[in-house]
Amino acid sequence: MGLFDDVLKGNESLIKNEDALDYEFLPKLLPYREQEQRYLAACIKPLFQKRSGRNLLIHGPPGIGKTAAARFVLRDLEEETDDIHAVYVNCWQKNTTYKVLLEVCDQVGYKFTQNKKTTELMDVAQRIINKSAAVFVFDEIDKAEDFDFLYFVLEEVYHKAVFLLTNYRSWLVELDERIKSRLTPELVEFKQYNAAETKGIMEERRDYAFPDGVWDEKAFASVVQKTAQLKDIRSGLFLMREAALQAEERSEKRIGESHVIVAVKKLDDFTVKNSAELAADEQLILQAVKEHSGSKIGDLFKHYQKQGGAASYKTFQRKIKKLEEGKFIDVEKTMGGAEGNTTIVNRKLTDF
Ligand SMILES: Nc1ncnc2c1ncn2[C@@H]1O[C@H](COP(=O)(O)OP(=O)(O)OP(=O)(O)O)[C@@H](O)[C@H]1O
Ligand SMILES: [Mg+2]
């Protein structure tokens, strides 16, 4: 038997439209985020009259439609007008001012960027954009290594709205005063979807991605339930794809519970934001949480110090908060009790 016989025999994929399971896939509609999208649009509208738009810090945990909503609004804007530049930059991928400016120039239609220095790129971008107006979405803003590009946009672009997206609301606190005072963003919190909303989104995605009747109903219900529990649509997409691949591997024609169970096991190793991307100190803290899940924060700090952690207690607390916001860990506050208020830190449970 050849290893690829099944391919040659035309063993069909159970997935009809693989793109629809991509995290970057932008569906035709974005239900349950209408209000947020309308608000984002309202912050852009003044640009149509050559006035300044509003700046926003859009925050919330992973996988709940922040990027999708922002890209949706930009797409609508581009369909509506050619007079306002719509610039989207992911600062995880473009994490320096130079890289951001290359991207900005590219998106406003300037292609002769080769061999140009950052300041030259700024001059070009400014000249082009100031003929009209621009919306900037800087996604994953906390991943940027320097913020000169932000200063540049705030200082040199006349008519703009700047939307910054992050999991970490606390990111703003540490931002350079020079930038903060020019930015003065409004905070927009994206809340997690409830169970019914999660179900609606997952059903829609299933119908984009799979032919009718491929999913066993109970199996799909478990996927939805797990997704609702994790409160992260991306993990739901992961589960749908993995379960489908499991079924395909076994040459089965329907996706059933046994496939979902395997997919869920794989989820355990999959954190939506890969923890390998965390800084060394945060890794150390995460490790301590994994080993001493359920500890009080003070005790956890001692474990962390024993393992060589050097941060102050205050910094440690801040990092715990950050890990919580990034959904790497869970934090519970217990009120009252014999010892007054305490904070208990838990590892994330992804078990079924
Ligand atoms: N209301 C919705 N309707 C349809 N799909 C959605 C909705 N909300 C989120 N999704 C889908 O869920 C996935 C994750 O959403 P998105 O990438 O916008 O998350 P995010 O909030 O930006 O997360 P992160 O903070 O990790 O970047 C995407 O594939 C997106 O299309
Ligand atoms: Mg995002």
Image (cartoon, rainbow, N blue to C red):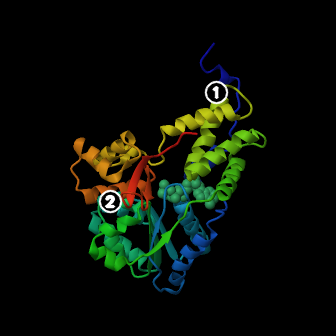
Q: Amino acid at mark 1?
A: Glu
Could you tell me if the residues under marks 1 and 2 are in contact, i.e. CB atoms within 8 Å? Answer: no
**Most distant residue in the right direction:** 213
Residue 85, labelled with which disc? none
Density class for disc 2 (Cα within 10 Å; few <14, some 14-19, many ≥20) is: few
Q: Amino acid at mark 2?
A: Arg
Q: Quadrant of residue 98?
A: bottom left
Residue 257, compared with residue 322, is above or below; it is above
Please tell me whether mark 1 or mark 2 is closer to you in this view.
Answer: 2
**Marks 1 and 2, how far apart in space?**
45 Å
Q: Earlier in the sequence, mark 1 or mark 2?
A: 1
Residue 321 screen position, x and y as percent: 38, 58
From the viewer's perspective, tell me whether residue 89 is left or right of residue 76: left
Residue 191 screen position, x and y as percent: 54, 64
Numbered disc 2: secondary structure: helix
The residue closer to the viewer here, 190 or 8, is 190
Residue 140 screen position, x and y as percent: 42, 59
**Is any part of residue 94 visible from this angle?**
no
From the viewer's perspective, tell me whether residue 171 is left or right of residue 218: left
Circle 1 residue = 249
Which residue is at a point 58% across and 49% down the rendered structure image? Answer: 229
Residue 94 screen position, x and y as percent: 38, 57
**Is any part of residue 9 visible from this angle?**
yes
Residue 268, compared with residue 104, is above or below; it is above
CB at disc 2 and ligand 1 closer than 8 Å: no
Residue 318, labelled with which disc? 2
The residue closer to the viewer here, 280 or 2, is 280
Q: Quadrant of residue 36?
A: bottom right
